[in-house]
Amino acid sequence: MKQPSLYIPHGGGPCFFMDPSDPDRPHSDPMWHPMQDYLAGLFASLPEKPRALLIVSGHWEEPQFTVHHGGRPSLLFDYYNFPPHTYTLRWDAPGDPQLADRMDALLRKAGFPVAREEERGWDHGVFIPMKVAVPGADIPVVQLSLKQGLDPAAHIAAGRALAPLRDEGVLIIGSGMSFHNMRVRGHDGTGRAVEWDDALTSAVTDPDPQRRAARVAAWDRLPYAQFAHPREEHLLPLMVALGAGAGDAARLDHRSAVIGWTVSAYRFG
């Protein structure tokens, strides 16, 4: 069955796994629980179990789109100043080199130069949310990088190029945070964060796919855009998910409040 494409929040660092007494099970500060519960129920909401996951994380950028071809990636603990046990977490999902080859072909057919990578581990934008959503790590994963320059139109076009994979049982996931300003903590920015999120959600859920893409590509014109994203790497995975869901209905799939941020997830199809 055709899979949707998703834009999901991946939280902050290892936020769902902060209990050293049982590091393999999600235990976190209660403010993260709504997001954690959303991720834990994510795969039960799908039409069927995906045969593979294509994940674009806000934590991997390359000069050109790069596809991970590794068969057994390790984990990349690319977060800092967290408890020691959070650097011994495990999530042993396999790669899928055949899917990686198919992604290469689709992107090249769309006119994109594509690089190949085999050694990089899954970054925390992949393994932290997926350790909650797929604790058994029993679905193959291929990660796609962002393209430096962070051009929204290029990432939407890449998503469109990869859209046929949805008919092949592949779930396309953009993993980021719809609000990502590390200087904002507490209630000081709450009103602006909500106004930004309302404007972004209105653009993402526009019923006209062409107008939707144009509005989201022009994200920096929305209210408080630069406040929400001083740098937009955590928003760009949304562009890929939106492109992959180009002709389908879009909906707000989750919204929660953490550390004064309003954070949303979206589903296409």
Image: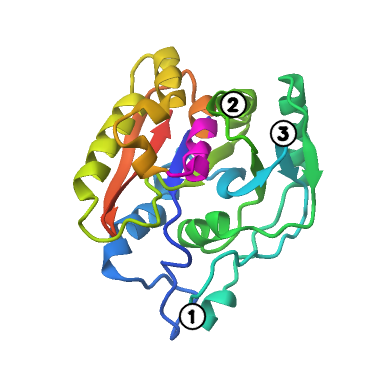
Please determine whether, in this image, residue 113 is positioned above or below residue 20.
Answer: above
- SS for dot 1: loop
Q: Give me the C-alpha separation between circle 1 and circle 3.
A: 37 Å
Dot 1: few (<14), some (14–19), or many (≥20) neighbours within 10 Å? few
Looking at the rendered structure, which numbered label has been put on residue 163?
A: 2
* Residue 75 visible at all: yes
Q: Give me the C-alpha separation between circle 2 and circle 1.
A: 39 Å
Please determine whether, in this image, residue 80 is positioned above or below residue 222.
Answer: below
Looking at the rendering, the stretch of residues picked out in magenta corresponds to 230-240
Three-letter residue code for mark 1: Pro
- SS for dot 2: helix
Q: Which residue is mark 3?
A: 103
Q: Does the magenta-highlighted stretch encompass residue 239?
A: yes
Query: Mark 2 or mark 3: which comes first in sequence?
Result: 3
Q: Which residue is mark 1?
A: 83
**Displayed quadrant of residue 211:** top left
Q: Does the magenta-highlighted stretch encompass residue 41?
A: no
Please determine whether, in this image, residue 174 is positioned above or below residue 184.
Answer: above
Three-letter residue code for mark 3: Met
Query: Mark 1 or mark 3: which comes first in sequence?
Result: 1
Three-letter residue code for mark 2: Ala
- SS for dot 3: helix
